[in-house]
């Protein structure tokens, strides 16, 4: 037996065991995706998306209205902040309407449906009375309120159709009448055609397209069969073709799709082409806020219908993609609210408002990009125009109220501790447990009327 230098026998060491394999390191990308998905699935996600998205769009719109309207105001011998001050006043009034709508119960919204519809029809008919209605850019759709203030009743017709149709379809669904095509179409389609007729008397086809989109969105939500859906769509398409063919102005707008020269095929495409010029000159990060060149008289309606072009020129591709992302988040939140409720009125109203805002945004942005004809509709919450801003902000308040009314969202809101105000009894605030989405779901009532999955 070998010995060590000291004469002692060597120490027998146990064979080294292989190290136990530790837990596998999770992929950081997968971990980030998992966390984002959990955060996205929380009950207050739709509430925060609607509130935050609409607020950001409105604030950014105010900034761009101030930047895009200065030159136009100075050319009209007005103060540079003239249009901004009017838009800011409309936004302040709209914020009050949003707050009121978000705090109103669903029953009160349904009770207001018929009065709002009657008021909208009355004002839209009043537009055609000589001496009361006034024409702006060839459209007889305005009523003067004195001074520089005007109102466009057709913008309120969108809100009226959404509320009234949602209440009508909800009552018919409760009575199980929507399985019959007569009850699905009457009186929804005749009333919608009445509103469309009053709008087209003034020549505003852009607003009529939005109203038609709302009608088809409601019919789709109501479960209209394919044959019925295609039939109504064919009739609306035929009427649209006739209205376009009989109007040289509308035919000229149709000819400007994809135009690259101010004169394209004999049509005047100045506005469409200069909108493309503005977007192309912005680059990735834009020329800087207030540094637009096209707004110096080259681009008509720079602060209204073509404010997205000025945004692309001053804020670049990053700015335009941010606006698109905000509208996409708003649309997703509206679809989520409509899909997670079992209250038929909430489903139809949320779906109608979402269709209204997303369709109008697509039509406006598509016209600026040269992909659609110029319809003369503003970008929701973004373009200048108080008549469009007020009903839109009220509709956003509707979505916020519906998002808060979800049972899981109510539980989550009740678990939040107030940062300020009265303390709990005893002066001590109990320790809060984990505020996880799974915990909130367990505390929600077993029979969830929201249809949460």
Image: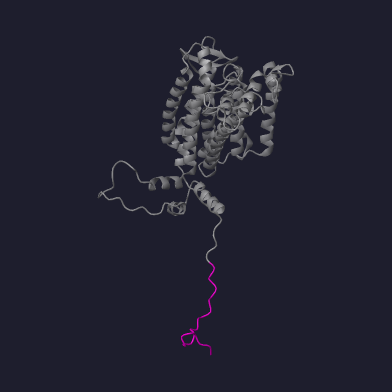
> Which residue sits furthest top?
131
Q: Measured from the top left, where is residue 10 in percent x and y?
A: 49, 85
Residue 120 visible, this orientation: no
Magenta stretch in the rendered image: 1-21
Q: How many labels does the image show?
A: 0
Q: In this view, does 170 lie above or below 26?
A: above
Q: Which one is nearer the viewer's eye here, 287 or 10?
A: 10
Q: Measured from the top left, where is residue 376 in percent x and y?
A: 60, 22
Q: Which one is nearer the viewer's eye here, 63 or 47?
A: 63
Q: Which one is nearer the viewer's eye here, 191 or 51?
A: 51
Q: Measured from the top left, where is residue 106 in percent x and y?
A: 45, 37
Q: Is residue 10 above or below residue 363?
A: below
> Which residue sits furthest bottom?
1
Q: Is residue 32 above or below residue 61?
A: below
Residue 35 visible, this orientation: yes
Q: Measured from the top left, where is residue 52 in percent x and y?
A: 47, 37
> Which residue sits furthest front?
5
Q: Which one is nearer the viewer's eye here, 372 or 310?
A: 310
Q: Does the magenta stretch include residue 4?
A: yes
Q: Is residue 84 left or right of residue 267?
A: left
Magenta span dominant secondary structure: loop
Q: Does the magenta stretch include residue 143?
A: no
């Amino acid at each position: 037996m070998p010995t060590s230098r000291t004469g002692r026998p060597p120490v027998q060491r146990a064979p080294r065991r292989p190290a136990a394999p530790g837990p596998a390191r999770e992929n950081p990308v997968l971990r980030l995706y998992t966390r984002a998905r959990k955060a996205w699935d929380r009950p207050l996600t739709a509430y925060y998306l609607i509130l935050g998205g609409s607020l950001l769009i409105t604030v950014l719109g105010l900034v761009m209205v101030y930047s895009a309207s200065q030159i136009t105001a100075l050319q009209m011998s007005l103060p540079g902040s003239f249009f901004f001050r009017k838009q800011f006043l409309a936004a302040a009034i709209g914020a009050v309407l949003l707050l009121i709508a978000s705090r109103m119960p669903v029953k009160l919204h349904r009770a207001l449906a018929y009065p709002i519809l009657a008021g909208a029809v009355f004002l839209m008919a009043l537009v055609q009375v000589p001496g009361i209605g006034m024409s702006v850019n060839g459209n007889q759709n305005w009523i003067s309120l004195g001074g520089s203030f005007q109102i466009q009743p057709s913008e309120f017709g969108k809100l009226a159709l959404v509320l009234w149709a949602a209440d009508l379809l909800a009552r018919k669904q409760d009575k199980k009448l929507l399985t019959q095509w007569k009850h699905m179409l009457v009186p929804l389609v005749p009333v919608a055609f009445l509103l469309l007729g009053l709008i087209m008397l003034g020549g505003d086809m852009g607003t009529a397209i939005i109203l038609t989109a709302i009608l088809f969105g409601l019919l789709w939500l109501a479960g209209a069969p394919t044959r019925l859906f295609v039939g109504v769509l064919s009739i609306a398409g035929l009427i649209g073709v006739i209205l376009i063919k009989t109007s040289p102005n509308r035919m000229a707008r149709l000819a400007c799709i994809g135009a690259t020269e101010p004169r394209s095929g004999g049509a005047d495409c100045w506005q469409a082409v200069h909108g493309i010029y503005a977007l192309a000159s912005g680059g990735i990060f834009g020329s800087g806020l207030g540094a637009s060149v096209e707004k110096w008289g080259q681009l008509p309606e720079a602060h209204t219908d073509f404010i997205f072009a000025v945004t692309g020129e001053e804020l670049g591709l990053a700015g335009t993609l941010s606006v698109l992302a905000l509208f996409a988040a708003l649309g997703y939140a509206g679809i989520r609210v409509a899909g997670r409720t079992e209250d038929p009125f909430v489903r139809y109203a949320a779906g109608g408002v979402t269709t209204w805002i997303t369709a109008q945004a697509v039509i406006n942005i598509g016209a600026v990009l040269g992909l659609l004809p110029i319809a003369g509709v503003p970008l929701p919450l973004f373009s200048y125009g108080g008549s469009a801003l007020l009903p839109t902000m009220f509709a956003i308040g509707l979505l916020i109220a519906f998002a808060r009314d979800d049972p899981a969202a109510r539980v989550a809101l009740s678990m939040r501790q107030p940062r300020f105000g009265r303390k709990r009894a005893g002066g001590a605030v109990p320790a809060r447990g984990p505020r996880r989405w799974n915990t909130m779901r367990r505390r929600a009532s077993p029979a969830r009327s929201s249809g949460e999955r």
